[in-house]
Structures are given as structure tokens and as C-alpha cells.
Amino acid sequence: MVVAGSRPSVDNARMRKVLAALDLSIAVLSIAVLGIALVTGGGFARAEDFPSRPLTMIVPFPPGGAVDPIARILAEGMKPPLGQSIVIENVASGGNGIVGVGRVARAAPDGYTLSFGNWSTHVVNGAIYALPYDLLNDLEPIALVATTPQVILSRRGAPAQGLRELVAWLKANPGKQSLGTVGVGSATHIAGLFFQERTGTNLLLVPYRGAAQGMQDLLGGQLDLMMPQATLALPQVRAGTIRAYAVMAATRLASGPDIPTVDEAGAPGLYLSTWSALWAPKGTPKSIIATLAAAARAALADADVRARLTQLGQEIPPAEQQTPQALGAFQRAEIAKWWPIIRAAGIKGE
């Protein structure tokens, strides 16, 4: 005979045991999660406390080239808002920056390793090389930093005084004049190919490990021509050690107003401008990306930073174009524009 009320007592006892077991499981799980956080360094804590130590900005080219000084100016400008220094690491092992960019693509997504690159490394390389990373899916955009046109230069002793004379001189001596490039697919390389195609000239392309090395030979007279970024060209143009024929853009540079545009100099439409920007590894927390992007915008709003970049021939984009979203959209648009052109030209990585 079952006494009334006895069964609920048994059920209550069983329920208490189930709840006790559940509490124990939750406690064990909480300890496990805490242990993982301690082993990995506490990812959430890192995002909240970021940055708590110096950062590394990898520049995939040698020191002294066209890209390096822009990165250093930006790094200095980002130090005050971040409260931490940014160490520049030049990784110039060849492949037009592939090694350096790859380092960042494989780095921990914690915001402490950044990729400073340009149109060549983060657009062109994807069209001519089988990259060990995906330019759009393995990197997080942070900020577009600056844009600049290529400049058509010659050694000081070249006989041509203007661009029309230069083209005539090159046509009279096909295959005899040398043009320095920074490897296959670099902006200097594509600028040279574009120049030859549009002017009907034939040049001897000479690859260099970095733009600075090519500039040294141009200054020494061992190289006839070069078409680097304005960043590298302007100091030497101002010093009168090389000759500038035109900027490859529709408007003159504010920092080099005496240099005509290609339209004015006799090669209309011969435009090629490059740009530089900042990325982090894919998976970097959004809060860290936002912190880095805010620091980059603060740096680009600083009067001293702007003056130094302008002096190098750099044009700083408006603030609304400096966001991670704007850089991502801009990079995708550049890839859609240039990949078909580069592939149609048959440019292949070596």
C-alpha cells in the first residue's frame, strides 16, 4: 500500500541529485574554460587591454625604398593614441613582398603584428603569383593611408629635356636604354610596361631588390630610367640629381608643382598611381581592429604627419575613406579593375 505523498518525496530527492550533478558539471566546465583562457593568454582580456606591449609593423621591402618611410611616419604617428611604440620590421626576401605579407597572414590574430603594404603587394601579386595566402580572406583591413602617382625619371645626363624628347630618343635607340624595376609585378615594372605600350618604345628592364638600390644606380648614371613612386623621386628631383619628366596622373603634385602631368608633357592618359594601407591577420577581434583604425586616423589627422607625408608626394585620403570598411571595398574594387588588365598583359611571377 502506497502512503499518500510518499512518491513526490522520492521525486524531490531525485531532482535534488540531478541538480547537484548539474551544478558540479557547470563548475567543472567553468574551471576548464578558465584554464584555456589562462593557457592562451586570455583572449578576451587581451582585446580589452590592447595594446599592452609594443607592436610590430612588417614592411615587405628593404629600408630606404618608397614604402618604408611612409610606414615609419605612420608608426610614429600612431604611437601617442595607442600608448605603445610600433617597431618596423623590413622583410625583403624577394617575391615582391610575398614573404613579408605571408608572415602577417600566418601571425596570431591579436593585433600585435601588422602588415603595411601597397597596391603592388595587396593587389597585383594576386594576379601574377600563386600566393600561399588569400589577399581578401586572410587579412583584416585597417586603414587606407595614402596614394601617390609614379614619376617618370631619368639620369641627370640623359639628352632629353622633356617627355616628348625622351620618347623620341628612346624610339631612336630601341632596346638600348635601361629601365629599373623592383621585380615582376611591382608598380615600377607595370609602369614601365604601360609606358612602352602607350609610347611605342622598347626598353631594357633591369630588376632590383628594392627601389632604393635602383635609385642609387640612376644617381650614379648606371641606369637610364626609372618610374618609382613620388615618395622616392621628389627628394632627388629637388636636389637636381635626377631629371623628372612627368607625374603619371591627371593633376600635379602639391609637393612637386613644377613637375608636369603626363597629359601636359605629351603622353595623355598614361596614369598609374599606387596606394599604401594597413592590415592585420584575419580573425583579429573587431575591438582591436577598431582601436588600430582609430589610431591610424588620429595619426593621419596630425598636422606634422600630414606635412611629412605631403612632402614625400603622398596624398592623404579623406577621413571617411580611412575606415576598415572603406579599405576593404577599395581593395576589392582595385582587384576587380587591375587583375584582368595584368592577366591580359601576360605578366607572370618568376
Image (cartoon, rainbow, N blue to C red):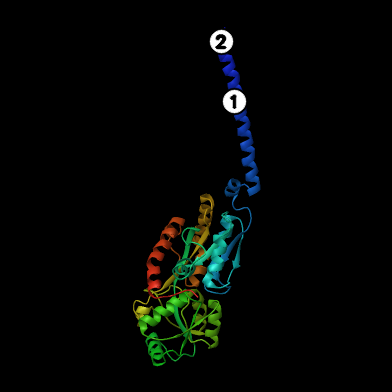
Label 2, label 1: how far apart the Cα atoms are: 21 Å
Q: Look at the image and tell me in which quarter the N terminus lies.
A: top right
Q: Nearer the viewer, residue 89 or 20?
A: 20
Image coordinates for residue 269, horizontal then vertical, percent: 34, 76
Crowd rating for badge 1 (residues with CA inside 10 Å; few <14, some 14–19, many 20+): few
Identify which amino acid the numbered label 1 is placed on.
Val
- Point out which mark residue 134 bears: none
Q: Secondary structure at mark 2?
A: loop
Image coordinates for residue 191, horizontal then vertical, percent: 43, 77
Q: Is residue 202 left or right of residue 140?
A: left
Q: Nearer the viewer, residue 32 or 304?
A: 32
Residue found 52% across the figure and 78% down from its top:
235
Earlier sequence position, callout 2 versus callout 1: 2
Crowd rating for badge 2 (residues with CA inside 10 Å; few <14, some 14–19, many 20+): few
Q: Is residue 128 left or right of residue 17?
A: left
Reply above or below: 285 against 232. above
Q: List the residue tagged with mark 1.
A: 18
Q: Is residue 115 visible?
A: yes
Reply above or below: 29 against 186. above
Q: How many marks?
A: 2
Image coordinates for residue 249, horizontal then vertical, percent: 39, 74
Q: List the residue tagged with mark 2.
A: 5
- Tell whether label 1 touches label 2 (CB within 8 Å): no
Identify which amino acid the numbered label 2 is placed on.
Gly
Q: Is residue 259 visible?
A: no
Residue found 61% across the figure and 24% down from its top:
17
Task: Locate residue 104: give its quadrant.
Answer: bottom right
Image coordinates for residue 40, horizontal then vertical, percent: 63, 49
Reply above or below: 327 against 163. above
Q: Secondary structure at mark 1?
A: helix
